Image (cartoon, rainbow, N blue to C red):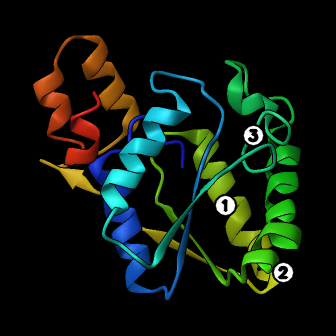
Amino acid sequence: MNADPLTKGHEYLIHEALKDSDVLHVFLLSYDRDMYPLETRMKMLKGLLKDEKRAVIHEGGDYMISRGTFPTYFFKDKKDGVRAECELDIRLFGEKIAPALNIKKRFAGTEELSGFTATYNSFMERILPEYGIGFITVDRLRIDGRPVSASEVRRLVREGRKEEAEELVPLSTAVLL
């Protein structure tokens, strides 16, 4: 997850995944691309999971949805190469990362707001079973009928509407907005 910032949607996804996991590996994108740097996003995530012993936090580093494997994710024009990048990133996860951590399932929220993320999810659904990894989608959290999204939180913060933004994030994020 990018968690820029960490929202109640991220919190919900994590807790849903924990229901079906002995150990949950949470990968935080390392690249600082938007509002909150990695250090701040890591504080948000660690604050959220401070009492959860079954969750292990990892920085995504250079090989998980990074500039090295997903350059178009970090540019405005994302059309060229998206399919190849999705496959490269997921196969790298399936061949190297998942076996090293004994990961048998990967979780993602349903995606209706980002075409890129929806494409990535469809590739995970197709490719991960080749590596014996289950792919589980969790319905996106909605508050007052609207999907919770980090993009919306960033917009509210930029517009100076911090109180509205705080309604969409856990306390570990709200104190850092």
Number of the label disc, if any, that sits on residue 122: 1
Label 1 – label 3 distance at C-alpha: 19 Å
Disc 1 and disc 2: Cα gap in Å?
A: 14 Å
The reply to whether the C-beta atoms of the residues labelled 1 and 3 are less than 8 Å apart is no
**Residue at coordinates 63% horizontally, 58% vertically from top-left?**
121
Question: Residue 139 falls in which quadrant of the image?
Answer: bottom left
**Residue designated by label 2:** 130
Counting residues from the start of the chain, the first of labels 1 and 2 encountered is 1
Decide which of tag 1 and tag 3 comes sooner along the chain. Answer: 3
52 with respect to 121 (left or right)? left
Q: In the rendered view, does 64 fall on the left or right side of 81? A: left
Q: Depth-wise, is mark 3 or mark 2 nearer the camera?
A: 3
Pick the front one: 61 or 156: 61
Looking at the image, which residue is at 82% across and 71% down? 94
Q: 105 or 62, which is in the foreground? A: 62
Q: Position of residue 117 (x, y in %)?
A: 59, 46
Can the viewer see residue 93? yes
Q: Which residue is mark 3?
A: 66
- Please tell me which residue is depicted at 68% across the width and 80% down the height of the picture: 103
Q: Is residue 121 above or below residue 42?
A: below
Q: Secondary structure at mark 3?
A: loop
